[in-house]
Amino acid sequence: MSDDFNMSMRKFLKQVGVTSQQAIEEAMRANGAAGKSFDAKMVLSIPELGLEHEVTGKITGQDS
């Protein structure tokens, strides 16, 4: 793949990671989630490519 492709993908994935972490941290603080575990799911879709990719996991709130 080309350098432009790799750079655009890395830029997108970095944005996803940073903004997702911020949203999760904010929601955890707002809901008093310290020490609790939550099921999480991230869905990536690119309709024009017929792509639907799902990642699941658990996130545990930091103890206060």
Image (cartoon, grey):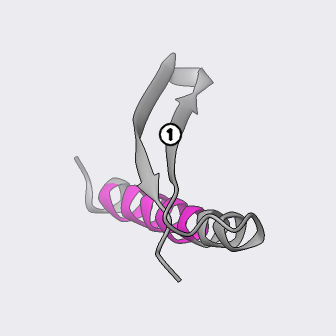
Q: Position of residue 62 (x, y in %)?
A: 47, 74
- Residue that protrudes farthest toward the left in the picture: 1
Q: Position of residue 11 (x, y in %)?
A: 45, 67
Secondary structure of residue under mark 1? strand
Q: Write down the region rendered in magenta.
A: 6-21
Q: Position of residue 40 (x, y in %)?
A: 51, 42
How many numbered callouts? 1
Quadrant for residue 23, please give it. Answer: bottom right
Q: Position of residue 61 (x, y in %)?
A: 50, 66
Q: Nearer the viewer, residue 41 or 51?
A: 41
Quadrant for residue 47, please give it. Answer: top right
The question of residue 20 being in magenta is answered with: yes
Quadrant for residue 22, please give it. Answer: bottom right
Q: Amino acid at mark 1?
A: Asp
Viewed as shown, does residue 2 lie left or right of 12?
left
Viewed as shown, does residue 6 lie left or right of 61?
left
Viewed as shown, does residue 3 lie left or right of 61?
left
Would you say the magenta stretch is mainly helix, strand or loop? helix
Which residue is the site of mark 1? 39
| Residue at figure coordinates x 56%, y 69% from the top left | 34
Q: Nearer the viewer, residue 21 or 33?
A: 33
The question of residue 11 being in magenta is answered with: yes
- Residue that protrudes farthest toward the bottom in the picture: 64
| Residue at figure coordinates x 74%, y 63% from the top left | 31
| Residue at figure coordinates x 69%, y 68% from the top left | 32
Category of crowding for the residue at label 1, using alpha-carbon neighbours closer than 10 angstroms: few (below 14), some (14–19), many (at least 20): few
